[in-house]
Amino acid sequence: MNYRIQSGDTLSRIARNYGTSVSALMKANPQIQDANKIYSGRSLNIPGSRDEFIPSSGRPGSAGRPSAPSQAGGATGPSAPSEGTRGPGGSPFDIAQANLGKNAGSLKMEKSGVGADMEDWVPNDVNCANFVSACLEQAGQIKDSQHNNSVYGLQGNLDKDPNFKRVSLAEAKPGDVVSMKTPGGQHVVMFAGMKDGKPQFIGSNNVNPDGSQKITISSMNYPIMSIHQYRG
């Protein structure tokens, strides 16, 4: 995952926030020569905190990986949009579904809708939180200041927002924000209802041959860290 350094940041504070160490940050960012000198506005690689969505290979022992994602052409959504949460600007599930099949890199170039709220500088293989944040912004459920391109960062912002409440998977509705722990880091998507008895999730996933992300719906078997439901 890439993090944009903010004014007042220190490597020790960033390491603490992302559950890593200063030495690990230094190794992941060889351009930093002095741990006490980092500059706001520059990007920082966060080790062990990357998006990782790996379609199942179907081989024995592949449990814990998601099943193959739905293709855009047949993705009408496993649940009716009316079942989902809504904000002043509409349903984040509807907004995400309207962008199915689009590559994250192309979506960020759009000047309206979700693309306008996604931050262009985020690399095309780590847009999961960027996309979910933008959908929530478009729905009016969060403010621009709450947009975060980190899974943990967005999770923390929603924990602090009184309009959101953590719920169980049994209580989840389409559009709820689902943060997951993956073997290599974290991933965040939105709940998209049930299909054939399995929960489905919509988001920006690493399904392209080059590792970049596309908006897809699929089932996933990663451990869920939290589910945030809008109650505003």
Image (spheres, rainbow, N blue to C red):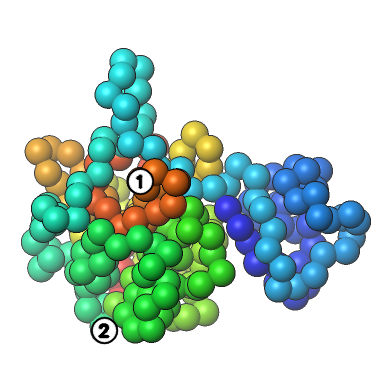
The residue indicated by pointer 2 is 88
CA–CA distance in space, label 2 to label 1: 32 Å
In the shown orientation, is residue 7 left or right of residue 111? right
In the shown orientation, is residue 212 left or right of residue 195? right
Observer-side mark, 2 or 1, equals 1
Q: Which sits in the foreground, 69 or 142? A: 69
Q: Is residue 40 visible?
A: yes
Q: Position of residue 35 (x, y in %)?
A: 87, 55
Q: Work out which residue is located at the far front of the displayed protein and give it.
A: 210
Q: In which quadrant will I find the C terminus? A: bottom left
The residue indicated by pointer 1 is 207
Which image quarter: residue 196? top left
At label 2, the amino acid type is Pro
Judge whether 119 appears above or below 43 on screen.
below
Q: Position of residue 97 (x, y in %)?
A: 21, 64
Which image quarter: residue 172? bottom left
Q: Which sits in the foreground, 48 or 28? A: 28
| Mark 2 or 1, nearer chain start | 2
- At 42% from the left and 57% from the top, the residue drawn is 128
Q: Position of residue 7 (x, y in %)?
A: 75, 75
- At 27% from the left and 53% from the top, the residue drawn is 216
